[in-house]
Amino acid sequence: MTAYAHQLAALFLTKLGEGDLAWTAASRGLAAANASQDHVVIGSLSRSAAHSLAAIGEYAQARGLAATAAQFLEPRLGKPTPQLLSVYGSLHLVCALAAARNDDRASAATHIAEADAAAQRLGADGNHLWTAFGPTNVSIHKTTIAIELGAAQRAIAIGAPLDTSTVPVERQVRHAIETARALARWNRIDDALATLLDAEVIGPDQVRYHRLSRDLVRDILTRPRPPRLAVELSDRMGVRPAGPRW
């Protein structure tokens, strides 16, 4: 289906940090979804489009789009399919993340609570319509939201002990990157690096090419006496810090 093809393209481009291209792909996919008149497809592509808006810093617009799509799905929650619950919950995860990045703590808490309720109704981790939605993914987002709100210690408390083995590798690696970011902010550089290296074993391309992990390694390299393992990882990534040391 055209809508889902654009959704996958937008997801891939977002990970590479190509926010504008991701938005173009997602907006075209949303147009195709609207033409399909399938409420689940419309919700899924709205989620993708909202993610793309958040990636280019349009947090209020991202939250508005995702919240509107979630409201569109609400009347169908009486007897929801797993696909519907997953899309609905994932829309609230986008809202929560966008609100956190916009420093709106109250809205972030409201949306993450709604996503948590949807995950409990779903009852288990799944990957319906590539959402990876379920209780574990909600906890993954709680970690990210804590980081975005400047609560690195809370992010570590949630993220470090979390078992992510029940979600797709992409989610496992992304959570590891977020946890590593929190550890680095708490000046636990060795732990942050160890977390990245463990993630590289299961998802080498995602660690090496994701914008967040590259930014984190670049930051580690600028610190006094960066660990040898960080330099080796940077070589595999093709990452170099600014400055004369390189």
Image (cartoon, rainbow, N blue to C red):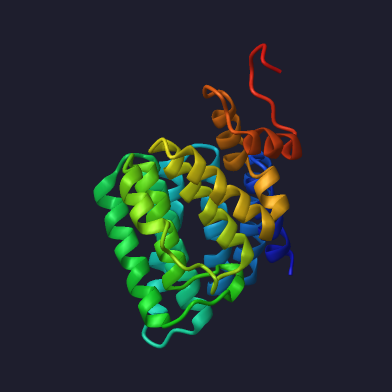
Question: Residue at 61% across / 55% down in the picture?
Answer: 199
Can residue 207 be seen in this snapshot? yes
Q: Quadrant of the N terminus?
A: bottom right
Question: Residue at 47% across / 50% down in the picture?
Answer: 179
Count of numbered tags: 0
Residue 134 drawn at (x, y percent):
46, 73
Q: Is residue 68 left or right of residue 9?
A: left
In the image, residue 220 sits, relative to residue 204, either above or below, namely above
In front: 196, or 105?
Answer: 196
In the image, residue 99 sits, relative to residue 90, either above or below, namely above
Residue 92 drawn at (x, y percent):
40, 61
Can residue 37 be seen in this snapshot? no
In the image, residue 149 sits, relative to residue 158, either above or below, namely above
In front: 39, or 105?
Answer: 105
In front: 231, or 3?
Answer: 231
Residue 148 drawn at (x, y percent):
39, 42
Residue 41 drawn at (x, y percent):
59, 70
Q: Is residue 98 left or right of residue 12?
A: left
Image-quadrant location for residue 117: bottom left
In the image, residue 107 sits, relative to residue 82, either above or below, namely above
Q: Quadrant of the C terminus?
A: top right
Question: Residue at 51% across / 67% down in the picture?
Answer: 164
What residue occupies the far top of the structure in this picture? 244
What residue occupies the far bottom of the structure in this picture? 79
In front: 79, or 184?
Answer: 184
Question: Residue at 33% across / 42% down in the picture?
Answer: 149
